[in-house]
Image (spheres, coloured by chain):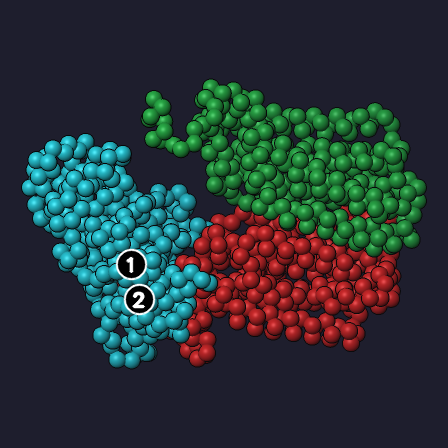
Chain colours: A green, B red, C cyan
Amino acid sequence: MTDRKSSRTVLAVPQTPEESAAKARRYGSWYFAEHTFRVMRMYAVSVAMYSVGTPLAYLFAMGVGLAALIDANGAGRFGGVDYLTFLAPALVASAALMSATGEFMFPIMDGFKWRRTFFGPHASPLRPEQIANGHIIGVGIRILLPTAIYFVIVALFGAAPGVWAWLSIFTATLCALSFGLPLMAWVSTLTRDAGQFAVVQRFIVTPLFLFSGTFFPLDTLPFFLQWIGWISPLWHATEIGRVLSYGYAEPVWLSVLHVAYMGATAVAGWLLSQRIFRRRMGK
Amino acid sequence: MSSTGVQQHLELKNVPQGLASLYSGNVRAVIGRGLLATRSSNWLVMMSGFFEPVLYLLSMGVGLGALVGSVPGPDGQPISYAAFIAPALLATSAMNGAVYDSTWNVFFKMNFAKLYQGMLYTSLGPLDVALGEIFLALLRGLMYATGFTAVLGIMGLLGSPSALLMVPASVFIAFGFASFGMGITSFMKTFQQMDWINFVMLPMFLFSATFYPLTVYPEPIQWFIQAMPLWHGVELLRELSVGAYSPAMLGHIAYYVVMIVLGLVLTTTRLRKLFLR
Amino acid sequence: MPLDSLSGSTPEYVISASNLTKKYGDFTAVDDISFDVPAGESFGLLGPNGAGKSTTMRMIGGVSQRTSGTLSIMGLDPEQHGPQVRAHLGVVPQQDNLDEELRVRDNLIVYGRYFGLPLSYLRPKADELLEFAQLTDKAGAKVDDLSGGMKRRLTIARSLVNEPRILLLDEPTTGLDPQARHILWDRLFRLKEAGTTLILTTHYMDEAEQLCDRLVVVDKGRIMAEGSPASLIRRYSTREVLELRFGSERNTTVAADLQGIGERTETLPDRVLIYAADGEAAMEQVSLRGLRPITSLIRRSSLEDVFLRLTGRSLID
């Protein structure tokens, strides 16, 4: 027995197959999250660049340039704060949402169709739902970090006066998951790449970005367009962000609703993704 | 394998001597292929290039415009905020479309779809492919610009008959970006490097007097922005939109003429690096 | 103006390469190779992956620039006259690069347009080629829906749209199942009979033996030997080969005991090869020495053996 083993490999496996299975059962999601991180390392420089560059560009252009125009004409419309302070929570949340859009579309299609990267780990002791979880963990952290950087830059611009403003880092990340996880569930069902991603970007993400009370209060819009805001995770994140950042006045039940809405959609998307992963890889 | 007529069809057009290795005078075939391929493309995606500036116009122009009120136009007369940003959105959309088609699109067809590999093993030369792709990009730009200008007309945002000149002018702007974009793509080897293109485009979009007059900036920053191509495009279209002709307009046009010429020279000299690695 | 007058006097060789070299930075992909191919010949470049075969093909097509040396295709330098040279060529690249955005028949027609051919010629030609490639009932299908073998046949059909005098085939059957390979070989054989010059790279011995009149063995960018498949085997190997397996532990130690049997022995990690004119006789001698291999096999020598002899390495790792 020992003889045969030594002739096969030089280095012996330090655990039995049973131990491997037990470990995979407990930590499998994190093993796949590790895979996600290793892949992300390939474009870590881009992510870092965007994490700093995008906030600077938007805050200078919108918060300083555009604000000069708006504060001169439309002052007093933003609950007593200047335009930059009003805008900043929306920018933080939309940046998170936009990175989530990419990370929950392309790698999923890559995993199931383009390069079929999910099927390699599927041949290991990992279960399909752990692969889904691992991707979610990886992307969640990959969004949390740049969001924190964004917030710090906002604070340096003096646009986050409240004591609890930093909590908006987490509500923005929750917003990313609230939109990203249902999106992930949908992408997991796709078998054909027919340009759907460009359609999502331009017909869903762009309108959300523009009509969720981001650049101006939602009630400025005609009534028949305001529903976009109500279903948009971005509006909920922006509103709660404003409450945390500068004490924007709204009823407590509404603040609770913002968080509950984002939490519920995120959990629904998560459970659905797990189910679809199980079904698709079980085939 | 019997037909014999093929050799007599295989006549090559007279092409300039120096370009014999790069050009076969058959740009038409590349354009024909592109038009045929659009049949199988996603029509929603095609339409989205038109919708994006319209959405921005509705959100920023109408929604935010309600807070901003009117701003001074290029001739000093006050105009609505929507009328102020509309030409800028058109110029930006011309830039985005042309840059996307000449960079990401070319990069993808080169390295992933391997489309050009097949084309370049025929009697086509790289210059045929480059000119064909640029033509297709401009054709698409023309369609979007026409659609957007029509929307402006419906919304009553066209201040002067000369605003119709924004359509050819935005194709002109797109030509400047497309001719340069392909040359720049020849230097790119990885997706990460391609990301740098977006990294340059975003600030250009945000800072080129698109959403607010240049005068909010201190003077040195104004000079810097005035050196960027998009600012000249925005100004050109903005002046056309209200019919405010000035000597500055000649400057904007000259800027793009130079950009087109330099871009084509750069792209042509880089064709071997781009296509014949 | 017909092409022949463009290219001057009819050249003796349709392809003529001398001291051809291609470097990528420090790496030399093609190292000073020379060969000539007369019209109508079927010429093979045989070697392992990374030997420089594909790079050579790309230089012939004028889509890769050589570092030094001269190259003439139908009397023209492909680097100076790329479009004119390629008008004579049909190319089947190693990886299919069909136009996924077009349907099967449109792939053929559009490709012909790149040669400036008129639709009046291309429409019937496309149908003829679909027939040739046994794809007539797939004319309106999406490329993505074809099987691997079908895609390969379509790529070959596409390369014939301009009735090329020279057909470049880069690993034409790699990745195909045996049946699909035989269909392809049959098609290529017909082209050869019709007088098309075939230039073929392969790392399959049987393919080279089936299709090539003459071939060069390439390794690390260099030509190691040149000749017809039969003459190469005669020159570098024996008529028969005896393959013995003693188990991975013993193969190396047993080699000494086999000294003197046959003309030559080669020890590989998984087996020992004995080169002999008569394999049966060699096997008897092995038994006489009291050696009991786990398995034994007598076969004819192939180009694989030629390659092993020339490079000391196996062709497919």
Up/down of B277 relative to A104, above or below: below
The residue under label 1 is C218
Q: Are marks 2 and 1 on the same chain?
A: yes
**Left or right of residue C171: residue B223:** right
Q: Are marks 2 and 1 in contact (CB under 8 Å)?
A: yes
Q: Secondary structure at mark 2?
A: strand
Residue at the (51%, 42%) spot, across then down: A193
Quadrant into which the N terminus of chain A falls:
top left
Residue at the (87%, 31%) spot, across then down: A250
**Left or right of residue A242: residue B273:** left
Cα–Cα gap, marks 2 and 1 = 9 Å
Q: How many dots with numbers?
A: 2
Report if residue B226 is visible in the image.
Answer: yes
Quadrant into which the C terminus of chain A falls:
top left
Identify which amino acid the numbered label 1 is placed on: Val
Mark 2 falls within which chain?
Answer: C
The residue under label 2 is C33
| Residue A108 in which image quadrant | top right
In front: A235, or A113? A113
Instruction: Of the two numbered discs 2 and 1 on the same chain, state the one appearing first in sequence.
Output: 2
Up/down of C185 relative to B5, above or below: above
Disc sitting over residue A51 in the figure = none
**Residue A21, image x, y percentages:** 49, 21
Residue at the (52%, 40%) spot, across then down: A110
**Residue A101, image x, y percentages:** 64, 40
In front: A85, or C304? C304
**Residue C301, image x, y percentages:** 15, 48
Up/down of B117 relative to C136, above or below: below
Q: Secondary structure at mark 1?
A: strand
Identify which amino acid the numbered label 2 is placed on: Ile
Q: Residues within 10 Å of mark 2 (few under 14, many from 20)?
A: some
| Residue A215 in which image quadrant | top right
